[in-house]
Amino acid sequence: MRILVTGAAGFIGSHVAQRLLERGDEVVGLDNISDYYDPKLKLARLARLETSSGFRFLKADVGDRDAMRDLFSGGGFDRVVHLAAQAGVRYSIENPHAYADANLTGFLNILEGCRHAGVEHLVYASSSSVYGANAKLPFSVSDSVDHPVSLYAATKKANELMAHAYAHLYRLPVTGLRFFTVYGPWGRPDMALFLFTRKILAGEPIDVFNHGEHRRDFTYIDDITEGVVRTLDKVATPSPDWNPMQPDPAVSSAPYRLYNIGNNQPVRLLDFIGAIEKALDRKAVMNMLPMQPGDVESTYADIDALGEAVGFRPRTPIEEGIARFIVWYREYYRA
C-alpha cells in the first residue's frame, strides 16, 4: 500500500514508518521538524528511514491548509497514519495556541484531505490524557471522558469528536488510538525516561513529582508500533450492536472505532526510576516535589477491545524496555 505517515520524524511516527517499510509498503513521511525539542534527533530518525527506497519525505506543516490540499490531491494514498501533533501536557499550559494550530486546525486539514482523496482508512493518535479527572481504573474506552485537566487533553478529545463527525457525514473509516506513556529507543527528550537518564549520568538531581507516587502505564515502542500497524490493517466499520439509547463512545453506527493502546500494567514512578538506576548501575539523587498542574495520579489501560479486534498484546516488561533504551542512549550520544 501507499501510506502517508504524518509526524514521521517523531518518536512513534518514525518507528511506525520503519515497520511499514520493512513489510514492503511505500511510505510518504510528513513532518515540520519543529524545535519543540532537538531537531537533530528528528533528523537522525529520518536518516534511518531514508535508507529505504520505499520512503519519501516531505517537510510541511499539517496546519498549512494549502500544503495539505496539494499533498492529498496528488498523493494517491491508500491509508493514513496521523501522528503529527503538538505534544506535551505541561507545554500546553505555557503555549496554548500551538495546540490549536497543530491539533485542531491540523487535524481538520487531515480529515478534509482524507475525505476528498477517498482514503480507505485513517488511524490517528489520541491520548490517555483524555481520561483527565476520571478515577475509575482501568480506563475504558466505553467510559465518558468529559473532564480534561489540560488543554492538550481537550484537543485530543476534540480530535475524537471531529473524527466521528467525518465518519458519520462522509463514511470515512477512522480509528483513534489512545496512547499510554510510550517509551523506548529514539524517544522524546522531554519525557521522563530521557530526562532521568541524562541527569543521572551527569550526576544531577532529578525532579520527582507527586513524590514518586504517580503510576503510569508505560508502554514500549515496539509494542505500540505493532498495535498501530495491526489497527491500520483492520478498516473501521459500523458496529451492528451500537445502541443510540445507550451510546458507547468507542463504537458507532458510522465506520468509527476508538481503542486504548497501553501495557495494561501500571508502574509506580519510584519503581520506574529504580529500573533506570539498575540499568545504569547508578543511584539517582531525587528532588521530591508535589503534583504538577495538569497532571493525573494514575493511568491504566483496559486493552481488551484492541486485543479482541486485532490480537494486540504487549510483550515487553518494563525492565527489558528500559535496558534497551539505555543501550540505545549510550550508543547514540557516544556517536
Image: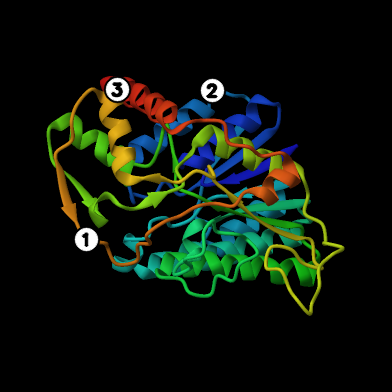
The residue most toward the bottom is 245
SS of the residue under disc 1: loop
State whether residue 76 appears in this view: no
Q: Are marks 1 and 3 in contact (CB under 8 Å)?
A: no
SS of the residue under disc 2: loop
Closest to the camera, between mark 1 and mark 2, is 1
Q: Residues within 10 Å of mark 1 (few under 14, many from 20)?
A: few
Where is residue 149? Give x, y as percent. 40, 70
* Viewer-side residue, 2 vs 153: 153
State whether residue 172 appears in this view: yes
Q: Is residue 256 left or right of residue 21?
A: right
Question: Relative to residue 21, is residue 66 depicted above or below?
Answer: below
Closest to the camera, between mark 1 and mark 3, is 1
Q: CA distance from mark 1 to mark 3?
A: 31 Å
Q: CA distance from mark 1 to mark 2?
A: 45 Å
Q: Is residue 174 left or right of residue 204?
A: right
Which residue is denoted by mark 2 in the rendering?
A: 51
> The C terminus lies in which quarter of the figure?
top left
Which residue is denoted by mark 3 in the rendering?
A: 330
Mark number, residue 290: 1
Q: Quadrant of residue 312?
A: top right
Closest to the camera, between mark 2 and mark 3, is 3
Mark with earlier residue (1, 3): 1
Q: Amino acid at mark 3?
A: Arg
Where is residue 173? Give x, y as percent. 76, 57
Where is residue 91? Give x, y as percent. 32, 60
